[in-house]
Amino acid sequence: MLDKANSATAVDVLCEVSVDPTMLARWQFASLTVYHFLIVPLSIGLTLLVALMQTLAYRQRAQTAGSTEAGTWDRASRFWGRIMLVLFALGIVTGIVQEFQFGMNWSAYSRFVGDIFGAPLAMEALIAFFLESTFLGLWIFGRNLLSPRVHLATIWLAAFGSVISAYFILAANSFMQHPVGLVYDTRQRRVELTSIWKVLTNSTQLVTFPHTIFAALLTAGAILLSVSAWHLRRDGTTVDPVHRKVAGLSLGVIILSVMGVSLVGHLQGQIMTDQQPMKMAAAEALWDGKSHASFSLFAFADVEKGHNKIDIAIPDGLSVLATNHLGGHVAGINDVQKQEVAKYGPGSYVPVVWLAYWCFRLMIGFGALAGLLAVLVAVQWRRGKLETSPRLLRIATWSVALPLAANTTGWLFTETARQPWLVYGLLRTRDGVSTNVGSGFVLTTLIGFTALYGVLGVICFRLVRRLAIAGPDPVGGQSDDPLSGGPVDEHQLSLA
Amino acid sequence: MQGFWFGLIAILWAGFFVLEGFDFGVGMLLPIVANTDLERRIALRSIGPVWDGNEVWLITAGGATFAAFPEWYASMFSGFYLAFALLLTGLILRAIGIEYRERAATPNGRRWCDGAIVVGSALPALLLGVAFADFLRGVQMNAAHDMTGGFFALLTPYALLGGLTTLSLFAFHGATFLGLRTTGEVADVARSLTRVLGPAAGVLALAFVLWTAQVRGGALSAALGAVMVIALLVAIAASRGGRQGAAFAATAATALLLPVWAFAALWPNVLPARNNAAWSLTVHNASSSPYTLKVMTIVALIFTPVVLAYQAWTYWVFRARVTGELADEHGYGDRGRVAAVLDKAGESARTTLGKPRKQAVAPPDPVR
């Protein structure tokens, strides 16, 4: 009897879990997207930086033939090319899942916005994916078959492909944040495209895209710094010149990207205040609108009562952030809730405030820390004391974790603070989910993909770590095959 | 306009079957055609530069379906939920296996990668045929176009026949590809395998075409099905006669015709409802608005030729057969770049074409 009762409870619990397919579908999308977005900024940024290194190598080839500097950038580009490819592979496979997930888990959403949302996705595949995968294949295997100039062009084309793929997918996401260029078709109960130009030049998109590309460069710059710092700390003044060169490049990239990402982020904040006032209010846990709004540094909210218990803040900070002048008025959560109820009918339009609040802060904090770290390293470098600062180098070895954390929290912020909307003002998340997919299936694939991704993540991390520790090929012993880790072995394949 | 997009999606599937078909074939035959590590590397190198670009044909088919027929995309992907999850798992395993194999530090690591490549090639090859058979037979659907059958309703004997057809066809296609594109032991084993794989694919394809004729389609699809089977018979004859170029061209034609034949049988349906024909998704009730179709048509007309041109160029660059010879390090030295490239092109051509007498057998370019 007791056993029966227990098992009934277990079944009840399972049913309880399985009643909300929306939540499961959201968990699945969130976990797979966050994972994808750990890899993709690295692969986009690294492809650009490897292309840059190979360009420097191409120029160096002509300029410094015979000097001790000769071949440094060439070895750097081959070394980082290997690491980039390991990450790129994982970025591609996790990206394919994303493209199919809209139809699999979000079929109601796909029906509702497919007329608009499908267009940038199809363009991404046709224009960007073909470009990046075809030219990446040419770059990997064509080193001996193509002239150096054409070979250099292939990596730039692959990098260009990955950047425009980011453009299209972010245009699709910007449509969800700020729908433009559409009309509602009452007969088919869906939204239809009226102007592709408006979708592709959405004001949200024009700030989101540079913000993301700067973040990608920041992330890639940080992994360059991490690995170079590790080698600098281990080898001191006898370090391979490749790592010194790359460390210098990484500092420039990080500092410029942090500046870029913050300037664009500031514009983004203003557009967000205008287009999604609830998101900005939630980001600040600002319950009641005010002029001279302060930028909160630490707050503890009592959500049910709709106010903060503790709040430590910079006076006028938020007003400046949101409106560009002291004393600008910023709407609060309670105000926007009232407005949206009036506009869209009864219901709660408040996202999870603590999540939005902390993700927003951590995103800014991690990004700023990465910039600060790069400045510190640059200062020690200028003073000629970098190799003798093991503690700083030890910290710098971990620098890649900062932008990765900033990317993740930023992504979580922008998606969760849009809730309960899937497409802002048009479609609620709970109305977008596939109705004919049982929660058992969603749970199965959620567990399956998470486990698979977990294993692949461990393998990828260990491979990158091993390649990074092994360092570049010794001078004169370059392998022609970027797929093989070390010097040419006697079974090297030949295509010619 | 809907007809144009129906045709374009058929072409994208056809491109995917032709190009990724041999990649799947090479992957699933890997442990059979190649015993030693060097042989496996030769086999994989034959698809190394191109498989990733070939896979994009599937992604683009998916994207084009989303843009041009959102209802079809939504119904298909949610209805074939578990099948597509398995397909994706297969594609992930294969990609990671191919990309990470060369980096594996131990023989054991390489064995895991080989296993991932075999499973990740065979599973999608099987599932694609199952899916196409289910499209042809029709699915259980409600008035809102949501599929209601569940996963196991998709696994009928007819669907399994479709799956085995694509599985065997891609294996055969991969074997003719290896026979054409590699040398030595790998090519020899692949060529002898075609003697088994060809007839197997032939029997299965014939059965599939005949059964399908009872289920769906008209005179046009019946004719296309007949041409497809004839192309397969030509491939069997050519591979028996040792004409590798012709054999590969014929398996490529078969793989190309399979989606074309299936789409011809489906027209004007995109996803027919078996339980009530009135609930079927057709090119008319599943399509995007005329404006979206117009925009996408312009984009497709501009970029498809560009994609075809650079993918064709890729096959031209890598036209040389893969050999196991030692790498010879050739720098560009003091000779001009043009001279170096011309030398290399000459070398590649000699390797590809073998003796001068054999020049009549031009390497087929599957893209054109």
Image (cartoon, coloured by chain):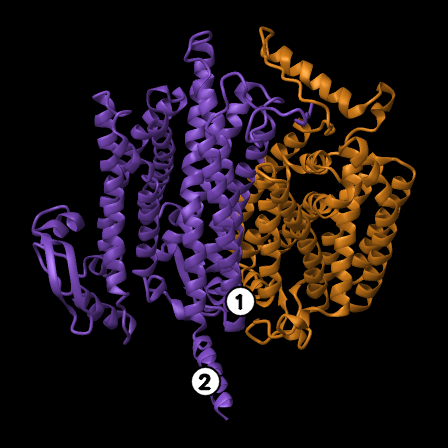
Residue that label 2 marks: A9
Report helix, strand or loop for mark 1.
Answer: helix
| Looking at the image, residue A68 lies above or below residue A232 | above
Colour displayed for chain B in the image of the structure: orange
Could you say which is closer to the camera, residue B144 or residue A235?
A235
Chain under disc 1: A
Tag 2 or tag 1, which sits nearer the N-term?
2
What numbered label is drawn on residue A444?
A: 1
Q: Position of residue A446 (x, y in %)?
A: 49, 63
Residue in the picture at 24% in, 41% down: A369
Quick check: can you spot residue B54?
Answer: no
Q: Position of residue B248 (x, y in %)?
A: 80, 39
Quarter of the image for residue A248 reads top left
Q: Is residue A411 left or right of residue B163?
A: left
Residue in the picture at 48% in, 28% down: A79
For the image, the number of numbered tags is 2
Q: Residues within 10 Å of mark 1 (few under 14, many from 20)?
A: few
